[in-house]
């Protein structure tokens, strides 16, 4: 695995992920569509660095492990260490903003959850986190209201607006850093809006972020 983060102009950021910290059920409508209660505090999990791969490359679906669901999420590239950070420190540590697919082996996840086991096999496998190139944070006037979407074969499947997050971006980064120190190159996935579904071979995907980024990819 030799994944390295890129900026949207194609240059290397010079950083690689140590880990990808994710939050589950951060959009109420998505929690409802899977019949999950909204947790009292952010539900955190981690994908290993080996899950990261470029979103621009064709997506490979794991064989014989059941359906692979897409979850389109705003991805934050960390540029400075954060430990027990304030929201201001969190803001100053954001290097870039991009999009990710939190790929999930849904039947396997359901089985693991039912048995009370950890989810890693369902969400942390090799290639489980396709990441877009990142837009430098300096290109945004504000990170308060970012819209993003996923279109599959011309149909809009997911539309997110960061104003709908249950735990907004800066409190989320601050909260994560209470437990997990975030280091330069780490990525935070901020949760998926409603509309998750099954990826199938041959699909064409287009992901867009607030007029700043458009990435197209396909499923092998
Ligand atoms: Zn997710």
Image (cartoon, rainbow, N blue to C red):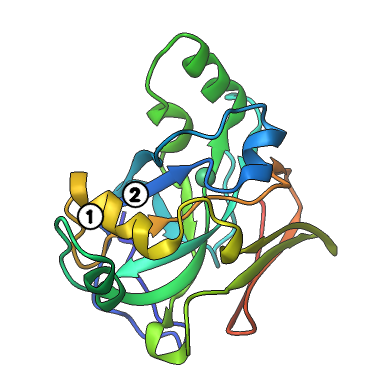
Give the residue at x 17% y 62%. 82
Query: Nearer the observer, disc 1 or disc 2?
Result: 2
Q: In which quarter of the view is residue 153 placed? A: bottom right
Residue closest to the far top: 115
Q: What residue is disc 1 on?
A: 18
Mark drawn on residue 75? none
From this view, report whether residue 169 is shown above or below residue 47. Answer: below
Q: Is residue 63 visible?
A: no
How far is mark 1 from mark 2, CA to CA? 10 Å
For the residue labelled by badge 1, is the local secondary structure a helix, a strand or a loop?
A: loop
Residue 155 rendering spot, x and y as whole percentages: 85, 60
Q: Residues within 10 Å of mark 2 (few under 14, many from 20)?
A: many
Q: How many marks?
A: 2
Q: Which of 32 and 116 lies nearest the eye of the viewer?
A: 32
Mark 2 C-beta closer than 8 Å to ligand 1 = no
Q: In which quarter of the view is residue 104 placed? A: top right
Residue 11 rendering spot, x and y as whole percentages: 37, 86
Q: Which of 32 and 65 lies nearest the eye of the viewer?
A: 32
Give the residue at x 27% y 60%. 186
From this view, report whether residue 159 is shown above or below residue 133. Answer: above
From this view, report whether residue 172 is shown above or below residue 26. Answer: below
For the residue labelled by badge 2, is the local secondary structure a helix, a strand or a loop?
A: strand
Q: What residue is disc 2 on?
A: 21
Give the residue at x 40% y 84%. 136
Apparent side of residue 115 relative to residue 61 in the rendered image (left or right): left
Residue 185 rendering spot, x and y as whole percentages: 25, 66
């Amino acid at each position: 695995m030799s994944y390295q983060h890129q900026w949207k102009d194609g240059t290397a950021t010079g950083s690689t992920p140590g880990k990808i910290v994710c939050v589950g059920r951060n959009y109420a409508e998505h929690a409802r569509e899977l019949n999950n209660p909204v947790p009292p505090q952010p539900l955190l999990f981690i994908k290993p660095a080996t899950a990261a791969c470029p979103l621009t490359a064709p997506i490979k679906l794991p064989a014989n492990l059941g359906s692979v669901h897409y979850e389109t999420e705003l991805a934050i590239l960390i540029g400075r260490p954060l430990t027990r950070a304030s929201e201001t420190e969190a803001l100053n540590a954001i290097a870039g903003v991009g999009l990710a697919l939190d790929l999930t082996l849904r039947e396997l996840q359901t089985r693991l959850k039912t048995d009370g086991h950890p989810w890693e096999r369902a969400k942390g496998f090799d290639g489980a986190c396709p990441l877009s190139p990142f837009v430098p944070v300096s290109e945004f006037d504000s990170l308060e209201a970012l819209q993003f979407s996923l279109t599959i074969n011309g149909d809009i499947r997911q539309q997110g607006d960061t104003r709908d997050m249950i735990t907004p971006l800066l409190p989320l980064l601050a909260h994560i850093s209470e437990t997990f120190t975030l280091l330069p190159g780490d990525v935070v996935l901020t949760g998926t809006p409603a509309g998750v579904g099954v990826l199938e071979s041959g699909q064409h995907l287009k992901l867009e972020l607030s007029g700043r980024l458009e990435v197209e990819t396909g499923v092998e």
